[in-house]
Image: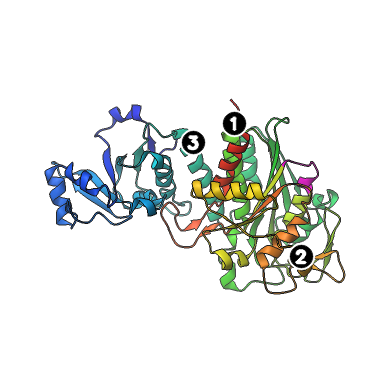
Amino acid sequence: MHPLLVIESAVAALERPPVAIHAVSPQNWPEIAKNLPPLALAFAAAQGYAAEGKAPEPGKAVLLPDAEGQVGAVLFGTGEDADADPFIYGKLPEILPEGVYRFSAVPPAALDGAVLAFLLGAYRFEKYRDNPVRQVRLVVPEDVDAREVSRLAEAVGLGRDLINTPANDLGPQELADAAHTLAIRHGARFSATVGEDLLEANFPLIHAVGRASATPPRLIDFSAGDESWPKVTIVGKGVTFDTGGLDIKPSSAMLLMKKDMGGAASALATAHLLLDARVKVRLRVLIPAVENAISGASFRPGDVIPSRKGLTVEIGNTDAEGRLVLADALALATEEAPDLIIDYATLTGAARVALGPELPPFYTDDDAAAAEIAETGLAVNDPVWRLPLWPPYDKLLASKIADVNHISSGGFSGSITAALFLRRFTKGVPHVHFDIYGWTPSARPGRPEGGEVQAARLVYAWLRKRYGVAA
C-alpha cells in the first residue's frame, strides 16, 4: 500500500474525519453548492463562487472552513466534463495543506485515474536536500484497487528516481545495481557481462560505445516467469551520461544528459509492473549500460565496427550512440525467437521536433498491435503516436565501406531512420520501438518537472490485457 493512501478500515482511527474534496465542474457546481453548509457557501461566494455563478477554475482549489475554523471541505475545479484532464487531480498534493482527504463527486469511471494522478503528483525527488514533504494523504475509495494504483505509482517513482539521479551517482554500475535489486525482489535470474568480457561474448558495439569511460560498459540481463508462457523481451537504452563522444555536444545540450538512461528506467518500471502483477509472460530484460565518455579510447567518426548480428556498422556520428548499444542487445533478444520485443530509448531529437516532449512516437510493422497500443495509451493517459517505418528512407543508411551507416546521409526523418536501423537487428521477430523523451520540461498535473517514465504504464496495460495474469 502506498504510504499516502489510507484504507477505509483505518479511517475510524484518524484524529478527525477526512476532509471532502469536491470535484467541481460547471455542470455539477450548482448541486454541490446547494449542499454546502451556510458558512462554507458564504465563504465560497465571497471568493466569487456563488451557487448560481462560476465554478472554480480547472486546477484551482478553494479551501472552505468548518465551524471551528479548520479546513472543512475543498472545492477543486476539474473543468468541463468532456475536456477534463484525466490527471488534473495530480495538482492537489501541491496546493493542499497537510491532512487526510477523501474524494467527493468524482465520476466513478474516473476514480482510479484520480487516485493515481494524486499519487503521481505527490512525487518529489529530495535525495540531495532536506526538504520535508507535506503529508497530504488520501482515503482510497472502496471502488478503487489500492494495490494496483500503488503498484503503478511505485513503478513510476522507481523510474523517476533513476532518471533524476545525476550521473556522478548513477553510472553503469549503479544502474546494474538497481536492476539487480529489482531482479532479486521478483526472484529473477540475473547476470551482467562487463568490460572486456563484452568482446568475448560478442557485444562489440556495446563495448565500443562504453570503452572510453572510467566505469566499464556492461549488458544487464535478467529474466523471470514460467518458461511455458509467451516470451516477451524488453530492451532499455542505458546511457547513463552522453557527452556526445568525440562529436561532443555543446554544453547546453549536455545539461540533461543524465536522462539518457530514461529507456532503461522505463524498462525497469515495466518489468516491476509485469512481475508484481504476475502477468503471464516469460519476461526478459536487457539493458546495455554505458557512459558515452571521451578519452583516448573513444570510438571515432568513420570507424567501422562489427555487430553481434554480423553486420558491419560505419560510425557516422559518435553522438548517435544509443542505437549502437541497442543493436547488439536487440540482436541477442532475437536469438531465442521471443513472441515480442519491446524497446524504450531516449533516441532522437527529431522525435521531439516532430511530436514534442509529451507524445513519444512508436514504430512497429504490426498494424493490429499498433492500434491496440495507441488505444491503450489514450485509455491510461500514457499517450503515444505511431510513425511509419517508411521503406524508401532505408537507403539513407547506405555506407560505401560497410554494411550500413548508423545515421542517415541527410538531415531529415531522423527518428524514422533510427527506427529503420534498429529494425535490421530484429527482422523476423515482432518488435515495437518507443522513442521516448524521459523528461517533463515544465510541470503538469501528475507530472512534476524532471524525470518521467513514458510508455511503461501503457505497455503494462496492453500486455496484461493480451496475456492475462496468473492466479
Amino acid type, residue under disc 3 in the picture? Glu
Q: Which residue is mark 2?
A: 394
Amino acid type, residue under disc 2 in the picture? Asp
Residue drawn where x is 17% and y is 50% of the image:
51
Nearer the observer: mark 1 or 3; the answer is 1
Write down the region rendered in magenta: 332-339
| Image side of residue 409 versus residue 112, left or right | right
Residue drawn where x is 21% and y is 44% of the image:
31
Dividing the image into 4 quarters, which one contains the N terminus? top left
Q: Quadrant of residue 463?
A: top right
Q: Quadrant of residue 258?
A: bottom right
Nearer the observer: mark 2 or 1; the answer is 2
Secondary structure character of the magenta stretch overall: loop
As drawn, the label of residue 148 is 3
As drawn, the label of residue 469 is 1
x, y (%) of residue 403?
85, 64
